[in-house]
Amino acid sequence: MIGILGGGQLGRMLALAGYPLGLRFRFLDAAPDAPAGQLGECIVGAFDDPSSLERFAQGLELVTYEFENVPVDTARFLAARLPVYPPPQALAAAQDRFVEKTFFQDLEIPTPLFAAVDHHSSLATAAARVGCPAVLKTRRFGYDGKGQCLVRDAAELERAWGKFHDVPLILESFVHFEREVSLLAARSRRGETVYYPLVENHHHHGILCRSLLPAPGITPELQLQAEQYAARLLDALQYVGVLAIEFFQRDGQLLVNEMAPRVHNSGHGTIEGATTSQFENHLRAVLGLPLGSTASTGHTIMVNLIGTLPPVAEVLAIPGAHLHLYGKAPRPRRKLGHVTLRHGDPSTLAARLAQLQDLLDESNGAHSSR
Ligand code: AMP
């Protein structure tokens, strides 16, 4: 019995990967209708409530998490009782963008220029260091483009600062990247490490909308560069589980944007597009089992279903389409599911993607005109 902190779609997909291995799952989530609750026992409680944590921990073999804002104290409270993977120090390193970027810098992993903005008085110094254009971001709790603002000059920076009410911020130089790619890595309790091929990611309004596995046109050198950076992070954190690292690619080089100490949306294509999915490899890693092959099984495109759902029957009428619904009520900007398309021939894949995109446009159009 594995305990998962968080009962969102990532927890749900971990469980779906774990049942064939004979595993059982218990989730902890504050939401009574968490998507994973449809598949396993879900304790409804706050991460900082000791009695919920005690109930959650009862009889578990180990704990993992699917949500990177699990309080570090919660992970440490549980780690005093049973194994917690990835290790709590990975959460601490990833939760604060300034701490995270300093960590990258210490490991000599290239990252955009950055500076902390703790007070209004540090704004000018940060701007002088980073330059413009830049992105002002909250240090904590930002996701899907939330808690960040692009600034092109000093006046915009001043206005952006006014929008964030006295929370610690970071200013980063804006990167004119060619594309965004991510690397999924897995390290097991026994130290075995595997890497997936780089994935190319496309965002819309700060939310991941599409991922291509493997990313087209990746040279062996670039893949190696990503893996070497990942290896430094895995070693430094004594990491166990799947780690996702997001990069900007510019002039044939990688700059790390951020990492997530968990399975990741950009890795969903591995369910059908890799020999072993990121979810199964995460479970194998935390259990100390041999890791599975990360080899791609063709060209794969994963498309997120955000805000509205296209008609199920029409999605399934696309040859080879795999539909994953998360059991969530539709709401603007909410990830409700994803569709994976896979084919050996890129032009067939492109035609199927166009079919899917038409359906998505129709359902988004129908929704916005209501
Ligand atoms: P994040 O929450 O840091 O992953 O940012 C969400 C998205 O905003 C990224 O995937 C990029 O598309 C964009 N973004 C974030 N930081 C930068 C940056 N420093 N330069 C350019 N684009 C950025």
Image (spheres, grey):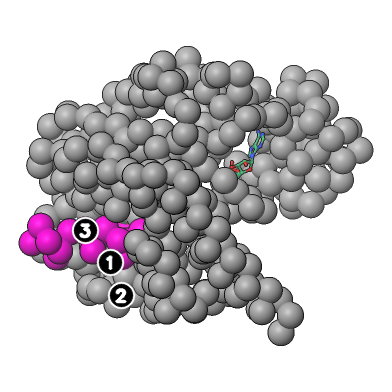
Dividing the picture into quarters, in which one does residue 297 lie? Answer: top left
Q: Position of residue 26 (x, y in %)?
A: 22, 67
For the residue with label 2, is its CB less than 8 Å from the closest atom of ligand 1? no
Q: Which residue is mark 3?
A: 17
Q: Nearer the viewer, residue 196 or 261?
A: 196
What residue occupies the far bottom of the structure in this picture?
370
Question: Is residue 30 in sight in this rendering?
Answer: no
Q: Is residue 152 above or below residue 233?
A: below
Residue at image mark 2: 37
Q: Is residue 314 above or below residue 75?
A: below
Seen at 63% across and 73% down, the residue is 362
**In the figure, is residue 37 to the left or right of 253?**
left
Q: Earlier in the sequence, mark 1 or mark 3?
A: 3
* Left or right: 317 in relation to 154: left
Residue 78: x %, y % from top left: 25, 53
**Residue tagged by mark 1?**
27
